[in-house]
Image (cartoon, grey):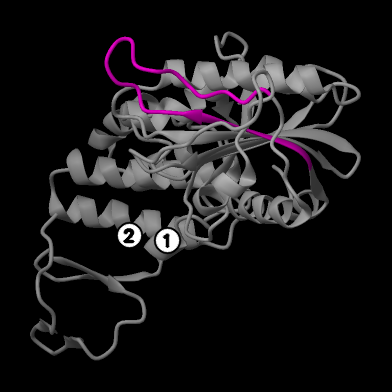
Amino acid sequence: MITSDELAATTIRHVIFHDVPEKGHEGAPGPQLSDIETKVDASQKNHLLTKLTRVISSTKAYSIRFLPDTKSPVPTQARLLTAGIFNRKRFIDGSRELANYLFEQHTKATSPGLLCVIDAASGGNSAIVLMKLERERGAQLALSGEEGEKTFSMSVLNDLVLTDGTRLFKTAMFIRTGTGDDDFKAQACEGQYNVFSADDLAKFWMRFLGCGFVVEPRVATQRFFESTLDFISNTVTEPTVKASIYEHLQSQMKANTRTFAPQTFIQEYVPEEYQQPYRDHLETSKISLAQFRKDVSDIQTSLERKLFKTKKGGVISVPSDVEDWLEIRPQDILIKDTVAKVK
């Protein structure tokens, strides 16, 4: 995982922008590619670095690794562009290849954007950063400069890129840590979609990067927790069993233990008739039954609830800080609230 210290030690050295439009009908114009780097002053570099730091350190950022059989040029270019002394021609040519490949991956549903490729350093290690930044559909951008030296000037991009409101859809950072092909610390952020969704749009950025996720403790914990909730909601039929498994899930997630063993949880807290369907459900979701280190930071909000189980099998789940709108009386419970959604 890329640490806050590594982000604090990061400096931006070279920047280039390419405009990657939405993909329309056959024969539609392709990307507008810069011929040379974009001139970026110190304050603009600092702004880009602030955006980078914010997203790479966010809870939507996950550690990634290169896939061995990918068709994406990103792993090859990340290796080339961080090997040895900076080579300007290699940087420009590599960034243009990435922009063309990004456009190839676009569908009609994919948002247009500016691909920003950054040559950076973190401490003494070379790094490459890829950012896809928001661009409004219909916004006109034009390259400036003589033929063979065209680029997007920051005077044009300032209002589109360097405003606080500009959304950074997708980001990836690759820091070289050694001389081997896989000696990298890499992290990616997908700002639009749930990265674990089956939706094809959610997989788009990782497919472009040619990378897969390294399952970290907080990722493993979140995936197990959410998959179990899905199993309880859609497979378990008896209300009392639903409540029991949910109670134990909450209890085990909150327990002061460093590790969590799904297999043990199944054996101890899931009724026998549901154990195999539950294992099958986890396997389908590509969730291992192996023990993992627990980190509830990404599900903390979901754990901050109180669960009340009634004598007749009813279950009431409320925020932990609820006070005046829940009244527990000798013979009944009064909820002073209105129904917003039925699940």
x%, y% of residue 178?
Answer: 87, 26
Predominant secondary structure, magenta span: loop
**Residue wearing tag 1:** 251
Q: Which mark is residue 38?
A: none
Q: Is residue 323 above or below residue 174?
A: below
Tell me: 43 left or right of 20: right
Does the CB distance between marks 2 and 1 fall below 8 Å? yes
Q: Crowding at label 2, few (<14), some or many (≥20) Cα neighbours within 10 Å?
A: some
Q: Position of residue 69 (x, y in %)?
A: 58, 8
Q: Which residues are magenta?
A: 13-35
Who is closer to the viewer here, 252 or 36? 36
Q: Is residue 23 magenta?
A: yes
Left or right: residue 170 compared with residue 203: right
Specify the amino acid type for callout 2: Glu
CA–CA distance in space, label 2 to label 1: 6 Å
> Dot 2 corresponds to which residue?
247
Relative to residue 332, is residue 145 drawn left or right? Answer: right
Residue 293 in the image, given as x and y percentages of width and height: 61, 45
